[in-house]
Image: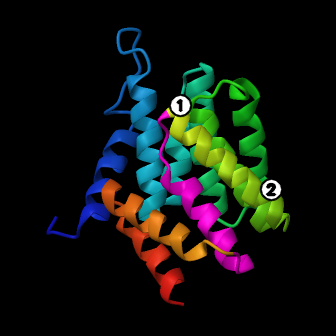
Amino acid sequence: MGDFGEGAREFDAGRAAADDGKVQQSAADGGVADRLRIDAAAALRTAGDLDGAVAAVDAVVGTGPETLGRAEAIRARVCWSSGDPEGMRAAIERGLAPVAGHGSVAEAMLRAEAVVVTALVDGHFEQGLEDATTAIALAEASGADLIRPLLLRATILTGLGLPGWTEALERVMDAAREAGDPETELSAANNLVA
């Protein structure tokens, strides 16, 4: 393969995990195959294979609230990446239905994605800022990834020119660096110097 970096490795791992011939759901593995499909969908979205990401999410067979919520959170990101804000809105609504009020990782992921709709689609930036702050607290409490809600909060602060935007972007950069997410780290750095 050559050394094309972490993105290429994620793409290869995602493609392999998304292949139903290689990842089989069984009664013995609980939700392992679905977790792999959800992880594959996230990796494929990051790598730019949106069709592959959709196929991986569509292959999720579990019906538990956390599985459904996580799958719909990834579907929402895929919709956003493909320029489908209404599809994103629908995925968030479907995902929140079984997990709203549970304080789970899936709810935290979905609440972060909802900030995109509130602020960037509907133009309600002040509400989006409040929702981003809530999503950060939920992510911290549930153990969900903090990078997305931190980035959204920083983006809104920066766009509105509100105090604290520099520190917010620096926090995103630190969190992304710690998580090994160079794409988000560079995005935040670009906003910091722009």
Magenta region includes residue 161: yes
Q: Judge the density around disc 2: few (<14), some (14-19), many (≥20) Cα neighbours within 10 Å.
A: some
Question: What residue is at 69 percent from the left and 67 percent from the top?
Answer: 83
Q: Position of residue 23 (x, y in %)?
A: 35, 30
**Coloring scheme of the render?**
rainbow
Q: Which disc number belongs to residue 60? A: 1
- Number of numbered tags placed on the structure image: 2
Q: Position of residue 138 (x, y in %)?
A: 61, 38
Quick check: 111 left or right of 180? right
- Image: 86 above or below 58: below
Name the amino acid type tagged 2. Glu
Magenta region includes residue 102: no
Name the amino acid type tagged 1. Val
Quick check: 144 left or right of 138? left
Q: Which residue is mark 2?
A: 86
Question: What residue is at 69 percent from the left and 69 percent from the top?
Answer: 156
Q: Which disc number belongs to residue 97? A: none
Taking depth in this image into account, of 179 and 81 the one nearest to the observer is 179
- Image: 72 above or below 176: above
Quick check: 9 left or right of 192? left
Residue range (magenta): 143-162
Taking depth in this image into account, of 44 and 139 the one nearest to the observer is 139
Residue 90, quarter of picture: top right
Q: Position of residue 54 (x, y in %)?
A: 56, 48
Q: Main secondary structure of the magenta part?
A: helix
Quick check: 19 left or right of 50? left
The N terminus sits in image quarter: bottom left
